[in-house]
Image (tube, helix red, strand yellow):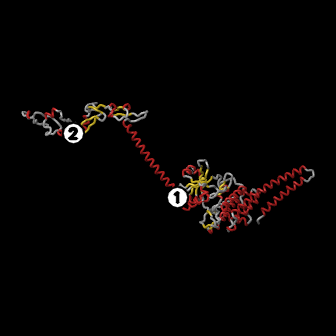
């Protein structure tokens, strides 16, 4: 750009001075004295250039390995060469772009300590203390990023865990309500003295106790559910009953009924309820473990080769009768079991009886002689009068117990309705009792009288008219009397044997000649009496 001087002393020259300057930086009006401006060195000159409009041609002009092409800001559409970041020098000559040592300039690196900065081609790295590994400049920011990510992950995990726990709590509460937990707690609260005996187990406790309800832990399957063997943390072995179907109002009612009924009972021959779990989809009951199976298992030759003796059978019948008698007359509120059968009579390691499965049981409140209900029970054990009228009373249990007595006598199963009872009654009428008795107990001839007495008792228990049946208290007393009589006879026989031995010894050592004859007479008399008793037992009842 050229300007004419306006200084009077320079009138003789039309162009006293000239220079080049960026157009935007000069105002001819304000800066008219060009000589003064030049002498003050205030001129602004910008020199710029570009290689070519073709970027590929530009790349050919960049001779340095660490150079790159970039579009010119001042000359639009043209490109020029420049050194890459981290390099400095002439990009138009080979090897012209030299590496910049960022570690020598504190403002060019972000390392916290100078001795941890290590220069690299085009950049630098920062080492980590105490032998840790890292990537220099990135490591200074990575811990922050890592911590932020870790914090975010922890927060999300915590929120997810809290949501899951809240969902599980809601599910457990919903299951608790659906399984009748509120109703159960209400009923138990009305019997405060029994509440402490009924423990509420958690789902996790019973899951761990049964190895997640593994198939190998199954003790048996019944009409109302499956029973598992469980081991609690204190090594207590328990039986855990898992209901077959959850959510059904009738099943829930039976479950709550069983818990409440068993909470009223404390008898040595009734299986003990330890607690329950209501958090699962189907309710769970926890009982004491009775390890020797059911009476049905021991009577079935296909399941148990070793038959239980008649003495044990009679004792089991007596203990069962005692338990049912307790339910009817000694419990705080009378209880009708409604499903007495050999499968519900469990045996411990000493073959002691334990009555179980109270899901169908009913409480009989004061003033109620009988209860109208929907008929429940097991075919073959059902009281025909209850089946016809729907009126439940204590004599219904008596009938079912009578069928159990028939199973003990005959070794047969009561699977079909009234088949065993009908066959037994007809055999008694035709005086063919000895033909239908279990051969495994018939071999024991000395029990003939007991077998006859128990058969007569059973025939009274299964009479069609309930009023003609004895009470369970009377049944228990008769069975106890038979056991007591047997013990008395055994003791009497022992005393007689001792007396005979004494007489024999006295007769052997006396000189009057009567001792030996007396002893022989005594033995002969005893044998004749035994034969007479056996004849009367076999001939009786005709």
Q: Quadrant of the N terminus?
A: top left
Query: How far across and how far down the image is residue 215, in percent?
Result: 57, 51
Q: Nearer the viewer, mark 2 or mark 1?
A: 1
- Asked if residue 430 shows in the view, the reply is yes
Q: Is residue 73 left or right of residue 327?
A: left
Q: Circle 1 is placed at which residue position?
A: 177
Q: Position of residue 160 (x, y in %)?
A: 45, 49
Q: Earlier in the sequence, mark 2 or mark 1?
A: 2
The foreground one among 41 and 506 is: 41
- Residue in the image at 50% along x and 53% along y: 169
State the image quarter where residue 140 is shown: top left
Disc 1: CA contacts within 10 A as few (<14), some (14-19) or many (>=20): some
Relative to 93, is 405 above or below? below
Q: Residue at x 36, y 31 (%)?
A: 114
Q: Provide the residue designation for mark 2.
A: 74
Q: Is residue 127 left or right of residue 238?
A: left
């Amino acid at each position: 750009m050229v300007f004419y001087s306006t200084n009077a002393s320079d009138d003789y020259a039309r162009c006293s001075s000239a220079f080049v300057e960026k157009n935007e930086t000069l105002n001819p009006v304000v800066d008219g004295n060009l000589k003064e401006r030049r002498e003050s060195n205030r001129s602004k000159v910008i020199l710029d250039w570009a290689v070519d409009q073709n970027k590929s041609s530009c790349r050919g002009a960049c001779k340095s390995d660490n150079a790159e092409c970039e579009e010119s800001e001042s000359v639009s559409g043209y490109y020029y060469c420049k050194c890459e970041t981290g390099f400095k020098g002439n990009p138009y000559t080979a090897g012209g772009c030299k590496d910049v040592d960022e570690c020598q300039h504190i403002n060019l690196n972000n390392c916290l300590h100078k001795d941890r900065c290590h220069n690299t081609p085009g950049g630098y790295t920062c080492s980590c203390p105490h032998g840790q590994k890292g990537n220099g400049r990135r490591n200074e920011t990575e811990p922050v990023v890592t911590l932020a990510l870790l914090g975010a992950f922890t927060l999300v995990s915590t929120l997810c865990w809290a949501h899951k726990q809240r969902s599980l709590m809601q599910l457990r509460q919903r299951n608790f309500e659906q399984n009748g937990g509120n109703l159960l707690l209400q009923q138990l609260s009305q019997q405060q003295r029994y509440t402490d005996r009924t423990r509420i187990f958690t789902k996790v406790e019973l899951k761990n106790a049964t190895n997640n309800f593994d198939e190998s832990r199954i003790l048996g399957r019944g009409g109302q559910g499956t029973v598992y063997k469980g081991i609690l943390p204190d090594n207590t072995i328990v039986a855990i009953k898992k209901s077959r179907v959850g959510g059904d109002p009738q099943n829930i009612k039976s479950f709550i009924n069983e818990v409440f009924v068993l909470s009223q009972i404390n008898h040595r021959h009734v299986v003990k309820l330890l607690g329950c779990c209501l958090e699962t989809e189907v309710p769970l009951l926890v009982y004491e473990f009775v390890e020797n199976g059911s009476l049905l298992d021991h009577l079935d030759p296909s399941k148990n080769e070793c038959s239980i003796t008649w003495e044990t059978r009679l004792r089991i019948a007596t203990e069962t009768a005692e338990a049912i008698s307790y339910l009817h007359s000694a419990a705080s509120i009378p209880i009708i079991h409604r499903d007495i059968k050999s499968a519900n009579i469990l045996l411990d390691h000493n073959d002691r009886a334990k009555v179980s499965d109270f899901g169908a049981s009913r409480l009989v409140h004061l003033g109620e002689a009988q209860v109208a209900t929907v008929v429940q029970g097991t075919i073959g054990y059902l009281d025909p009068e209850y089946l016809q009228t729907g009126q439940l009373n204590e004599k219904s249990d008596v009938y079912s117990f009578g069928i159990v007595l028939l199973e003990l006598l005959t070794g047969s199963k009561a699977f079909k309705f009234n088949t065993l009872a009908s066959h037994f009654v007809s055999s008694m009428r035709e005086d063919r009792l000895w033909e239908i008795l279990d051969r495994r107990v018939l071999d024991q001839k000395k029990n003939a009288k007991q077998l006859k007495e128990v058969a007569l008792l059973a025939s009274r228990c299964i009479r069609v008219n309930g009023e003609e049946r004895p009470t369970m208290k009377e049944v228990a007393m008769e069975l106890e009397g038979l056991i007591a009589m047997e013990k008395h006879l055994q003791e009497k026989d022992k005393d007689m044997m001792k007396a005979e031995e004494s007489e024999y010894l006295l007769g052997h050592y006396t000189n009057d000649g009567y001792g030996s004859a007396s002893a022989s007479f005594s033995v002969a008399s005893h044998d004749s009496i035994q034969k007479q008793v056996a004849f009367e037992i076999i001939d009786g009842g005709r």
